[in-house]
């Protein structure tokens, strides 16, 4: 007893049967023989066929999805064999066997155990994929064999996309925040399907959008040259796709006085030159002091005389006063 799966195949099979019946009503034995031959060929040609009810599907990460695969076969299902494979978008060259049905047994890929299962075995090859992940995205192939039916074709294909909101972007800055310096703000986001759009905005004093240089799809930077005190403020990077937006921020403070390493160097030079000046002053003072002492020593003799005179004078004065 042939089995029918899928409406279109029931239809064609019925037509084949009726052609057979009408021909058998013919009078000529030759006719009957020819018709039987045609019928036999027709029956032989009713090969196993696989149809995918969808050629592509989208699912949001974490949700479940049913991957449909219908087949029609005219043979008993005792030797039915179904293999689902996945060529992931992330590594198309290493396909994996998602799930296998063979001789009534179901074998799942170890990495998918507990997340994948047949929903209508053995009458349909549909599978359910629970708790979907971005890594589940790729090209799924459903291969059905049911000997002795020839397969025509025994393979169906569908593309699964797993959508995910952007992950939290990472904001960084680099450069010189002293006046006249240049600063690079960079932002990168690890995940998001479809690929998130990255933008940079300065939030205060008013919100302005900044021109962005993309480095690949997932990171973008903004270069600010010749920074001034007006450059200071809060900057926001946002990563947006149709599932949402995530932001990170950089708070930039531009020093109005020279700072950073060049400032330190200037400070060191200033200190050094000041020390030299002080040293010079010290030497000068010492020299002046010494020359001053010499002068005073030389003058001292005269002063001694003067003093002597004075003393003498005073003595005489004293004498006078005592007298
Ligand atoms: C998928 O999830 C549904 C509902 O949570 C559950 O009934 C079903 O058994 C799960 N299937 C597999 C293969 O884990
Ligand atoms: C930096 O800005 C100052 C003041 O606005 C300007 O005089 C100078 O030419 C600018 N330098 C560069 C390299 O743009
Ligand atoms: C940014 O930094 C400045 C100076 O350090 C501070 O006054 C201001 O509150 C900061 N703003 C935010 C949003 O963190």
Image (tube, rainbow, N blue to C red):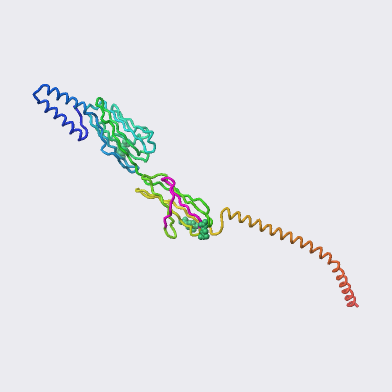
Q: Which residues are magenta?
A: 208-227
Between residues 203 and 19, which one lies in front from this camera angle?
Answer: 19
Residue at horizontal 20%, vertical 35%?
8
46 over 171 or under it: above or below: above
Figure disc tally: 0
| Residue 314 appears left or right of 37 | right
| Residue 74 appears left or right of 278 | left
Between residues 173 and 130, which one lies in front from this camera angle?
Answer: 173
Between residues 49 and 122, which one lies in front from this camera angle?
Answer: 49
| Residue 215 appears left or right of 2 | right
Q: In the rendered view of the protein, which quadrant contains the N terminus? A: top left
Can the viewer see residue 63 in this picture? yes
**Res. 293 image quadrant:** bottom right
142 within the magenta span: no
**Res. 82 image quadrant:** top left
Residue at horizontal 25%, vertical 38%?
53
Residue at horizontal 17%, vertical 23%?
37
Q: Position of residue 207 (x, y in %)?
A: 42, 58
60 over 180 or under it: above or below: above
94 over 292 or under it: above or below: above
Q: Position of residue 320 (x, y in %)?
A: 90, 77
| Residue 38 appears left or right of 94 | left
Residue at horizontal 16%, vertical 30%?
16
Q: Position of residue 261 (x, y in %)?
A: 58, 53
């Amino acid at each position: 007893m042939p089995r029918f799966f899928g409406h279109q195949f029931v239809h064609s099979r019925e037509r084949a049967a009726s052609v057979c019946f009408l021909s058998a009503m013919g009078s000529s034995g030759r006719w009957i023989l020819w018709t039987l031959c045609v019928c036999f060929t027709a029956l032989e040609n009713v090969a196993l066929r696989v149809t995918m009810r969808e050629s592509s599907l989208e699912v949001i990460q974490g949700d479940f999805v049913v991957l449909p695969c219908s087949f029609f076969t005219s043979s008993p299902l005792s030797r039915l064999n179904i293999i689902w494979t996945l060529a992931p978008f992330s590594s198309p060259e290493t396909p994996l066997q998602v799930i296998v049905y063979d001789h009534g047994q179901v074998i799942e890929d170890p990495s998918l155990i507990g997340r994948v299962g047949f929903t209508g075995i053995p009458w349909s090859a549909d599978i359910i994929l629970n708790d979907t992940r971005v890594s589940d995205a790729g090209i799924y192939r459903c291969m059905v064999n049911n000997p002795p039916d020839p397969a025509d074709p025994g393979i169906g294909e569908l593309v699964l996309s797993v959508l995910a909101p952007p992950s939290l972007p990472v904001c960084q800055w680099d450069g010189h925040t002293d006046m006249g310096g240049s600063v690079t703000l960079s932002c990168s986001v690890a995940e998001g399907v479809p690929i998130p759009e990255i933008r940079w905005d300065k939030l205060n004093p008013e919100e302005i959008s900044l021109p962005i240089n993309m480095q690949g799809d997932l990171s973008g930077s903004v270069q600010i040259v010749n920074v001034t005190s007006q450059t200071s403020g809060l900057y926001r990077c946002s990563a947006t796709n149709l599932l949402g937006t995530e932001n990170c921020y950089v708070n930039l403070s531009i020093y109005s006085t020279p700072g950073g390493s060049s400032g330190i160097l200037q400070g060191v030079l200033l200190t050094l030159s000041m020390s030299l000046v002080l040293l010079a002053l010290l030497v000068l003072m010492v020299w002046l002091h010494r020359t001053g002492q010499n002068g005073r020593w030389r003058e001292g003799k005269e002063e001694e005389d003067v003093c002597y005179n004075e003393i003498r004078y005073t003595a005489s004065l004293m004498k006078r006063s005592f007298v």
